Amino acid sequence: MPEVNVALVGYAFMGRAHSNAWRQVSRFFSPRLTPRLKVICGRDQANVKKAASQLGWEEWATDWREVVSRPDVDIVDVATPGDSHAEIAIAAAQAGKAILCEKPLANDVRAAKAMLKAVRKAGVTNMICHNYRRIPAVMLARELVASGKLGRIYHYRGTYLQDWPVDPSTPLYWRFQKEKSGSGALGDILSHSLDLGRFVLGSEVTEVAGALETFVKRRPLPEDPKRKGRVTVDDAALSLVRFANGAVGSIEGTRLATGRKNYNRFEVNGSRGSVAFNLERMNELEYYSREDDPKEQGFRQIMATEPSHAFFKAWWPAGHIIGYEHTFTHTIFDFLEAVAGRKRVKPDFEDGVRNQLVLEAIERAARTRRWVKVAEL
Ligand SMILES: NC(=O)c1ccc[n+]([C@@H]2O[C@H](COP(=O)([O-])OP(=O)(O)OC[C@H]3O[C@@H](n4cnc5c(N)ncnc54)[C@H](O)[C@@H]3O)[C@@H](O)[C@H]2O)c1
């Protein structure tokens, strides 16, 4: 298969997850393009050099501008904090590269829209990394909704709960600084629950109410733990939402749900049945059908690991479960296929802007304590 050269910007958490996926994708799937891990980029020379060798990249660099304009780079993968997504992605689009970008697309609607404009103008393949869409059990939930088996959809209930900064001595990382991250739990994790709601229901959010709260207002500075700095983002974000299909929902993201590590759960209730999913048991989908014999009705647990479930044929025999890292491999496989066919792949930058419009509406609703209509794209 023809090779494509990939440049990855960012080498920490998502940098490692994406590197693994770029390395594995051709070993388990047969994409029409074979990715070559050409160059990884970060700001710290010693660290990026180490990352290149550990994660399997041929070269390393410290200036993303030089990297995205290299004629031998075909794909740019953006895995940096939100404040740099727009600059990097717009430069990559102008240089004609296909772009995979981490979520949230940008730190505000204006930057997200500028990114969408740039990729449309350049006509390049673009994708936002909402990797949870490509979990086989989540794809089954969407199929059940689309098939009508759940009937008319009444509720979407999404919660994304973590507790990693519950200790107030957790330093003031970039994730607590609005100018770097745009928002807190809202853009970081509620954005995933929101995207899952739009994906599983196949319907847009039209109106929201919201509440944001920052409980730990000051945290130690990473470079000088004796001094503290102000937290400028939310710890917790909650929203009531209305979907275009008439369903109502609640979406919650918090980093202070003590004891919850990565509890990304949703439930959909319809007139004929319900489904429920929890990332911490990501190979399973709970399904309830009112059509079952009344004596046998109850939630049943489907192991979404059969060859007939999405992506599973490429991995293991049924019941031999997959994990977090596979979600990125699936995402990158579909992205590569889109690049090969010069086709659109979902979720793309348009989805990124749509999500950002809802996040912005939630912020406004929280500020004004009123319901807010989500702006048109
Ligand atoms: N899809 C998911 O499930 C998921 C999970 C975690 C994070 N994310 C998203 O991924 C992105 C990165 O988060 P992370 O957890 O990997 O953060 P991180 O702090 O672990 O890593 C950030 C990386 O970006 C580099 N970097 C920062 N600013 C840079 C710049 N201006 N130029 C070049 N490199 C720069 C840092 O050196 C580091 O390598 C964020 O947008 C975040 O929201 C997505």
Image (cartoon, rainbow, N blue to C red):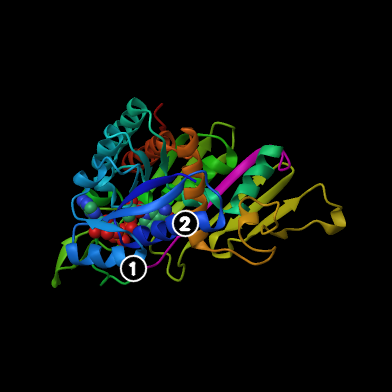
Residue 162 inside the magenta-drawn segment: yes
**Three-letter amino acid code at the position of disc 1:** Gln
Would you identify the image quadrant in which residue 168 lies? bottom left
Q: State whether residue 368 is above or below residue 6.
A: above
Label 2: which residue? 160
Image point (53%, 44%), residue name: 197
Tell us which disc is closer to us: 2 or 1. Answer: 1
Secondary structure beneath dot 1 equals: helix
Q: State whether residue 49 is above or below residue 274.
A: below
Q: Is residue 208 left or right of residue 43?
A: right
Label 1: which residue? 54
Residue sitting nearer the eye, 294 or 196 = 196
Would you identify the image quadrant in which residue 150 lies? top right
Q: Position of residue 54 (x, y in %)?
A: 33, 68
Residue 288 inside the magenta-drawn segment: no
The C terminus appears in which quarter of the rendering?
A: top left
Q: Is residue 133 visible?
A: yes
Q: State whether residue 151 is above or below residue 36.
A: above
**Part of the protein shown in magenta:** 148-164
Q: Position of residue 301 (x, y in %)?
A: 71, 61
Image point (46%, 33%), residue name: 342
Would you identify the image quadrant in which residue 2 lies? top left
Q: Is residue 176 visible?
A: no
| Marks 2/1: CA–CA distance | 31 Å
Q: Earlier in the sequence, mark 2 or mark 1?
A: 1
